[in-house]
Image: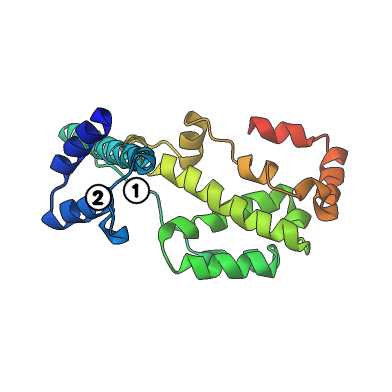
Amino acid sequence: MKNFYTKTLVYLLSLESREEQEEFIDLATNRQFQKNPIESEIDYMNMYLEEMEYQQERIAMAHQIQRAEWKMEQEAKKKGIIPQMREEYHSHRNPHLISKIAPEIWGFLSLENSQDRLDAYAFLIMDRWAHYFPQTMKTKDRRTITSLIKAVIEQTKMETEALDRMGAQIKRAQGVSDLELLQEAQINQYYYLLKADYILQDSAHQMDLETLKKTGIKREDFYQI
Protein backbone atom coordinates (compact mmCIF):
# COMPACT_ATOMS: atom_id res chain seq x y z
CA MET A 1 0.00 0.00 0.00
CA LYS A 2 2.84 2.39 0.88
CA ASN A 3 4.48 1.67 -2.46
CA PHE A 4 1.21 2.36 -4.26
CA TYR A 5 0.54 5.69 -2.60
CA THR A 6 4.16 6.83 -2.98
CA LYS A 7 4.16 6.04 -6.70
CA THR A 8 0.74 7.63 -7.08
CA LEU A 9 1.90 10.91 -5.56
CA VAL A 10 5.06 11.01 -7.70
CA TYR A 11 3.09 10.37 -10.86
CA LEU A 12 0.31 12.77 -9.94
CA LEU A 13 2.80 15.58 -9.38
CA SER A 14 4.39 14.88 -12.76
CA LEU A 15 1.15 15.58 -14.63
CA GLU A 16 1.12 19.02 -16.20
CA SER A 17 -2.56 19.81 -16.66
CA ARG A 18 -5.37 19.81 -14.11
CA GLU A 19 -7.45 17.74 -16.53
CA GLU A 20 -4.83 14.98 -16.54
CA GLN A 21 -4.64 15.06 -12.74
CA GLU A 22 -8.42 14.82 -12.35
CA GLU A 23 -8.60 11.99 -14.88
CA PHE A 24 -5.97 10.05 -12.98
CA ILE A 25 -7.64 10.67 -9.61
CA ASP A 26 -10.93 9.41 -11.05
CA LEU A 27 -9.23 6.25 -12.18
CA ALA A 28 -7.26 5.81 -8.98
CA THR A 29 -10.31 6.14 -6.73
CA ASN A 30 -12.55 4.12 -9.03
CA ARG A 31 -15.22 6.81 -9.04
CA GLN A 32 -16.52 5.46 -12.30
CA PHE A 33 -17.60 2.36 -10.37
CA GLN A 34 -18.95 4.46 -7.47
CA LYS A 35 -16.90 2.61 -4.88
CA ASN A 36 -13.63 2.98 -3.02
CA PRO A 37 -10.44 1.22 -4.12
CA ILE A 38 -10.10 -2.30 -2.79
CA GLU A 39 -6.96 -4.38 -2.32
CA SER A 40 -7.48 -6.38 -5.51
CA GLU A 41 -7.44 -3.17 -7.53
CA ILE A 42 -4.13 -1.94 -6.09
CA ASP A 43 -2.18 -4.40 -8.24
CA TYR A 44 -3.99 -3.13 -11.31
CA MET A 45 -3.13 0.45 -10.42
CA ASN A 46 0.53 -0.46 -9.93
CA MET A 47 0.53 -2.01 -13.39
CA TYR A 48 -1.08 1.15 -14.74
CA LEU A 49 1.56 3.32 -13.09
CA GLU A 50 4.37 1.15 -14.38
CA GLU A 51 3.01 1.52 -17.90
CA MET A 52 2.81 5.29 -17.46
CA GLU A 53 6.40 5.36 -16.19
CA TYR A 54 7.50 3.31 -19.20
CA GLN A 55 5.79 5.75 -21.57
CA GLN A 56 7.41 8.68 -19.78
CA GLU A 57 10.81 7.04 -20.12
CA ARG A 58 10.24 6.59 -23.84
CA ILE A 59 9.26 10.25 -24.22
CA ALA A 60 12.30 11.34 -22.23
CA MET A 61 14.56 9.16 -24.37
CA ALA A 62 13.05 10.60 -27.56
CA HIS A 63 13.70 14.14 -26.29
CA GLN A 64 17.25 13.17 -25.40
CA ILE A 65 17.84 11.85 -28.92
CA GLN A 66 16.37 15.02 -30.41
CA ARG A 67 18.70 17.17 -28.32
CA ALA A 68 21.70 15.05 -29.28
CA GLU A 69 20.82 15.25 -32.98
CA TRP A 70 20.28 19.01 -32.76
CA LYS A 71 23.70 19.39 -31.18
CA MET A 72 25.23 17.17 -33.88
CA GLU A 73 23.56 19.30 -36.57
CA GLN A 74 24.88 22.56 -35.11
CA GLU A 75 28.42 21.20 -34.89
CA ALA A 76 28.25 20.03 -38.50
CA LYS A 77 27.03 23.43 -39.70
CA LYS A 78 29.90 25.13 -37.88
CA LYS A 79 32.20 23.01 -40.04
CA GLY A 80 30.35 24.09 -43.17
CA ILE A 81 28.48 20.79 -43.56
CA ILE A 82 24.79 21.13 -44.30
CA PRO A 83 22.97 17.87 -43.42
CA GLN A 84 21.22 16.41 -46.45
CA MET A 85 17.91 14.56 -46.26
CA ARG A 86 17.46 11.54 -48.49
CA GLU A 87 15.72 12.12 -51.79
CA GLU A 88 11.97 11.67 -51.80
CA TYR A 89 11.01 8.72 -53.93
CA HIS A 90 7.62 8.36 -55.52
CA SER A 91 5.99 5.51 -57.35
CA HIS A 92 5.41 7.45 -60.56
CA ARG A 93 9.18 7.68 -61.02
CA ASN A 94 9.25 3.92 -61.49
CA PRO A 95 6.29 3.10 -63.78
CA HIS A 96 7.99 -0.14 -64.85
CA LEU A 97 7.36 -1.46 -61.35
CA ILE A 98 3.65 -1.83 -62.07
CA SER A 99 4.31 -4.86 -64.24
CA LYS A 100 6.78 -6.34 -61.73
CA ILE A 101 4.68 -6.27 -58.57
CA ALA A 102 1.48 -8.15 -57.71
CA PRO A 103 -1.50 -5.76 -58.21
CA GLU A 104 -2.66 -6.33 -54.62
CA ILE A 105 0.71 -5.29 -53.20
CA TRP A 106 1.02 -2.38 -55.60
CA GLY A 107 -2.50 -1.17 -54.93
CA PHE A 108 -2.20 -1.30 -51.15
CA LEU A 109 1.13 0.51 -51.00
CA SER A 110 0.02 3.03 -53.62
CA LEU A 111 -2.80 4.07 -51.30
CA GLU A 112 -0.36 4.23 -48.40
CA ASN A 113 2.02 6.19 -50.61
CA SER A 114 -0.32 9.17 -50.54
CA GLN A 115 0.11 9.39 -46.79
CA ASP A 116 3.79 10.15 -46.32
CA ARG A 117 7.30 9.78 -47.64
CA LEU A 118 8.09 6.67 -45.63
CA ASP A 119 5.77 4.54 -47.74
CA ALA A 120 7.05 6.08 -50.97
CA TYR A 121 10.45 4.59 -50.14
CA ALA A 122 8.75 1.18 -50.16
CA PHE A 123 8.77 1.22 -53.96
CA LEU A 124 12.57 1.23 -53.96
CA ILE A 125 12.52 -1.82 -51.71
CA MET A 126 10.04 -3.62 -53.95
CA ASP A 127 12.18 -2.82 -56.99
CA ARG A 128 15.22 -4.23 -55.20
CA TRP A 129 13.42 -7.40 -54.13
CA ALA A 130 11.89 -7.90 -57.58
CA HIS A 131 15.35 -7.94 -59.14
CA TYR A 132 16.27 -11.28 -57.54
CA PHE A 133 12.78 -12.50 -56.67
CA PRO A 134 10.54 -11.46 -59.61
CA GLN A 135 8.13 -14.39 -59.31
CA THR A 136 7.85 -13.92 -55.54
CA MET A 137 6.84 -10.28 -55.93
CA LYS A 138 4.22 -11.27 -58.54
CA THR A 139 2.79 -14.13 -56.46
CA LYS A 140 -0.91 -14.85 -56.53
CA ASP A 141 -0.95 -16.60 -53.16
CA ARG A 142 -3.14 -14.50 -50.85
CA ARG A 143 -1.25 -15.47 -47.70
CA THR A 144 2.09 -14.56 -49.25
CA ILE A 145 0.73 -11.27 -50.58
CA THR A 146 -0.44 -10.24 -47.11
CA SER A 147 2.89 -11.30 -45.64
CA LEU A 148 4.86 -9.39 -48.30
CA ILE A 149 2.89 -6.19 -47.67
CA LYS A 150 3.84 -6.40 -44.00
CA ALA A 151 7.43 -7.23 -44.95
CA VAL A 152 7.75 -4.20 -47.24
CA ILE A 153 6.31 -1.87 -44.61
CA GLU A 154 8.61 -3.16 -41.85
CA GLN A 155 11.68 -3.08 -44.12
CA THR A 156 10.78 0.48 -45.08
CA LYS A 157 10.51 1.57 -41.45
CA MET A 158 13.83 -0.06 -40.57
CA GLU A 159 15.75 1.48 -43.46
CA THR A 160 14.26 4.97 -43.35
CA GLU A 161 14.88 5.17 -39.60
CA ALA A 162 18.57 4.55 -40.24
CA LEU A 163 18.76 6.85 -43.28
CA ASP A 164 16.97 9.77 -41.61
CA ARG A 165 19.19 10.00 -38.54
CA MET A 166 21.22 13.18 -38.27
CA GLY A 167 24.47 11.24 -38.45
CA ALA A 168 23.33 9.72 -41.76
CA GLN A 169 22.29 13.14 -43.10
CA ILE A 170 25.73 14.54 -42.30
CA LYS A 171 27.51 11.62 -43.97
CA ARG A 172 25.21 11.93 -47.00
CA ALA A 173 26.25 15.56 -47.33
CA GLN A 174 29.86 14.36 -47.35
CA GLY A 175 29.22 12.05 -50.27
CA VAL A 176 28.33 8.77 -48.57
CA SER A 177 25.64 6.89 -50.52
CA ASP A 178 22.45 5.55 -48.95
CA LEU A 179 23.61 2.02 -49.77
CA GLU A 180 26.81 2.63 -47.83
CA LEU A 181 24.81 4.10 -44.95
CA LEU A 182 22.67 0.96 -44.79
CA GLN A 183 25.79 -1.19 -44.80
CA GLU A 184 27.33 0.90 -42.01
CA ALA A 185 24.12 0.45 -40.02
CA GLN A 186 24.42 -3.32 -40.65
CA ILE A 187 20.95 -3.48 -42.15
CA ASN A 188 20.15 -6.51 -44.25
CA GLN A 189 18.33 -5.29 -47.35
CA TYR A 190 16.32 -8.50 -47.59
CA TYR A 191 15.70 -9.07 -43.88
CA TYR A 192 11.89 -8.94 -43.79
CA LEU A 193 11.52 -10.67 -47.15
CA LEU A 194 13.51 -13.64 -45.89
CA LYS A 195 11.44 -13.96 -42.71
CA ALA A 196 8.06 -13.36 -44.34
CA ASP A 197 5.39 -15.88 -43.34
CA TYR A 198 4.38 -18.58 -45.84
CA ILE A 199 7.03 -17.50 -48.35
CA LEU A 200 8.91 -20.80 -48.29
CA GLN A 201 5.69 -22.66 -49.08
CA ASP A 202 4.96 -20.37 -52.03
CA SER A 203 5.62 -22.02 -55.41
CA ALA A 204 6.50 -18.62 -56.91
CA HIS A 205 9.31 -18.17 -54.39
CA GLN A 206 10.55 -21.69 -55.05
CA MET A 207 10.73 -20.84 -58.78
CA ASP A 208 12.95 -17.87 -57.95
CA LEU A 209 15.19 -20.02 -55.76
CA GLU A 210 15.57 -22.56 -58.55
CA THR A 211 16.52 -19.81 -61.00
CA LEU A 212 19.04 -18.33 -58.56
CA LYS A 213 20.49 -21.77 -57.87
CA LYS A 214 21.38 -22.10 -61.58
CA THR A 215 23.49 -18.93 -61.27
CA GLY A 216 25.23 -20.16 -58.14
CA ILE A 217 23.22 -18.02 -55.71
CA LYS A 218 21.61 -19.61 -52.65
CA ARG A 219 18.89 -18.21 -50.40
CA GLU A 220 21.36 -18.19 -47.52
CA ASP A 221 23.56 -15.74 -49.45
CA PHE A 222 20.96 -13.02 -48.95
CA TYR A 223 21.46 -13.14 -45.19
CA GLN A 224 24.86 -11.55 -45.80
CA ILE A 225 23.58 -8.61 -47.88
Residue 95 in view, yes or no = no
Tag 1 near tag 2, CB within 8 Å: no
Q: Quadrant of the C terminus?
A: top right
The colour scheme applied to this rendered structure is rainbow
Residue 199 visible, this orientation: yes
Which residue corresponds to the image point at 24% horizontal and 39% vertical from the top-left? Answer: 63
Give residue 192's position: percent from left, percent from top. 62, 44
Q: Nearer the viewer, residue 189 or 62?
A: 62
Residue 92 x %, y % = 52, 69
Q: Secondary structure at mark 2?
A: helix
Q: CA distance from mark 1 to mark 2?
A: 49 Å
Q: Total number of numbered labels?
A: 2
Q: Which mark is residue 29?
A: 2
Nearest the viewer among 78 and 146 is: 146
Q: What is the x, y in percent for residue 107? A: 60, 70
- Image quadrant where residue 70 sits: top left
Q: Is residue 178 left or right of residue 105?
A: left
The residue located at (51%, 39%) in the rendering is 179
* Residue occupying the point 59% across, 36% down: 188
- Relative to the observer, which residue lies in front, 82 or 195? 195
Residue 160 is situated, as x and y percent measured from the top left of the image, at 45, 46
Please determine whether, in this image, residue 133 is positioned above or below residue 61: below
| Mark sitting on residue 140 | none
Q: Amino acid at mark 2?
A: Thr
Comparing marks 1 and 2, which lies closer to the viewer? 2
Residue under numbered circle 1: 85
Dot 2: few (<14), some (14–19), or many (≥20) neighbours within 10 Å? some
User: Quarter of the image holding residue 143?
Assistant: bottom right
Looking at marks 1 and 2 on the same chain, the residue that comes earlier in the sequence is marked by 2
**Secondary element at tag 1:** loop
Depicted 21 relative to depicted 163: above or below? below
Q: Quadrant of the N terminus?
A: top left
